[in-house]
Amino acid sequence: MTTSALPVLNKKDFQTDQEVRWCPGCGDYAILNAVQGVFPELGIPREKFVVVSGIGCSSRLPYYMNTFGFHTIHGRAPAIATGLKISRPDLDVWVATGDGDALSIGGNHFIHVLRRNVGLKILLFNNRIYGLTKGQYSPTSDQGTKAKSTPYGSLDRPFNPASLAVGAEATFVARSVDVMQAHLKGVLKRAAEHKGTAFTEIMQNCPIFNDGVWDDVTAKDVREDELLLLEHGKPLVFGKKKDKGIRMNGLDLEVVTLGQNGITENDIIVHNEKHPNPAYAFLLSRMEGLEGFPMPVGVLRAVDAPAYENTVKAQLEAVTAKKGKGDLAKLLAQGDTWAVD
């Protein structure tokens, strides 16, 4: 018996007839472009893809993806996606969410899907603001952010999504930028390959309510000095002249200049995304916002651990082998029962 080869898919195969409706200049367009460009390269039949979302601008993504999809309620996309992946582990399930959707009302679902290591690919669009509801500060907004809900400046300390993910011991944590298309597509492909929860934070611009929020690190004229491109097995070197690096100084990280005081690449940390101790990835995630430090982008952590849907399946098979197949009617009728007339 032979099976026919999979049809060759392209980007157009993943586009729908729906009018893409985001504000002009929104970073969501770039993210959609990257996702639609990567899906046909994964060698997966189109009917095996599912895109699940919550509420927010980012959560319109399922409408624009010619795959199966589900637009859930605020913050609950990980819960719905978990149920789907457990019942249909053969499906490739992606979750589109925003910084508000995932980290505010959905924060509980977010951390638990990470610790369980469900085989989902989570894309968190981070523009540090609530866009759909017209400009309130979000859990990732900087302290002092003046928005419609904080006219005198936000007093809250913001979440660092990557740090939060590492703290929940996510097995895959990555970060990219909406406008860095080649980098973003590379990260998405890595996420697709991961067995377990793959979390990717995407720095994304909201031109209406938080325009230029990432310009200080992602603008073309500063990007080389302000971003650290992570590559497994390569030293943490950055800068236009590739003359700056990161080394350990006790329990802290330190920015140094190559060539000064005898410092060479041998003194620089070699990136190990597979480090079993999450403390290393956590240190990398905390570089964001520190004076003089670049923001790491790429894969911060990628370690192997059993995927939740596989452990659930194994447990069910073991119990069934021991006790036999269950009978739902008998289960409901056992013990004390009564009839209501």
Image (tube, rainbow, N blue to C red):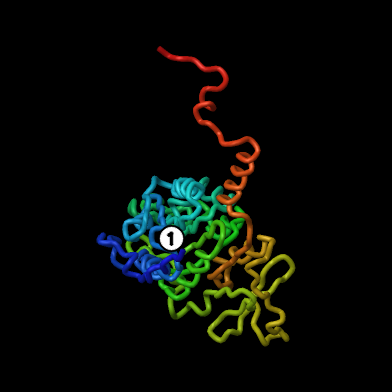
Residue 248 vs residue 143, the one in the foreground: 248
Q: Position of residue 30 (x, y in %)?
A: 37, 69
Compared with 217, 53 (above or below) is above
Tell me the amino acid under the disc marked 1: Phe
Q: Residue furthest right?
A: 250
Q: Quadrant of residue 258?
A: bottom right
Residue 165 in percent (x, y) is at 57, 56
**Residue for point 48% across, 50% down:** 88
Badge 1 crowding class, 10 Å Cα cut-off, few under 14, some 14 to 19, many 20 or more, is: many
Q: Quadrant of the C terminus?
A: top left
Q: Is residue 161 left or right of residue 321?
A: left
Visible residue check, residue 189? yes
Q: Is residue 160 above or below residue 230?
A: above
Q: Residue 199: x, y in percent? A: 52, 59
Horizontal side of residue 20 vs 329, given as left or right: left
Does residue 141 appear in the picture of this structure? no
Q: Position of residue 290 (x, y in %)?
A: 58, 67
Q: In percent of the image, x 39 and y 62: which residue is there? A: 46
Q: Name the one closer to the observer, 3 or 319.
A: 3
Q: Secondary structure at mark 1?
A: strand
Residue ID at (40%, 50%): 54
Q: Quadrant of residue 49?
A: bottom left
Circle 1 sits on which residue? 125
Residue found 45% across the figure and 15% down from its top: 339
Given the current orientation, which residue lies at the most extreme top position? 341
Q: Is residue 13 left or right of residue 3?
A: left
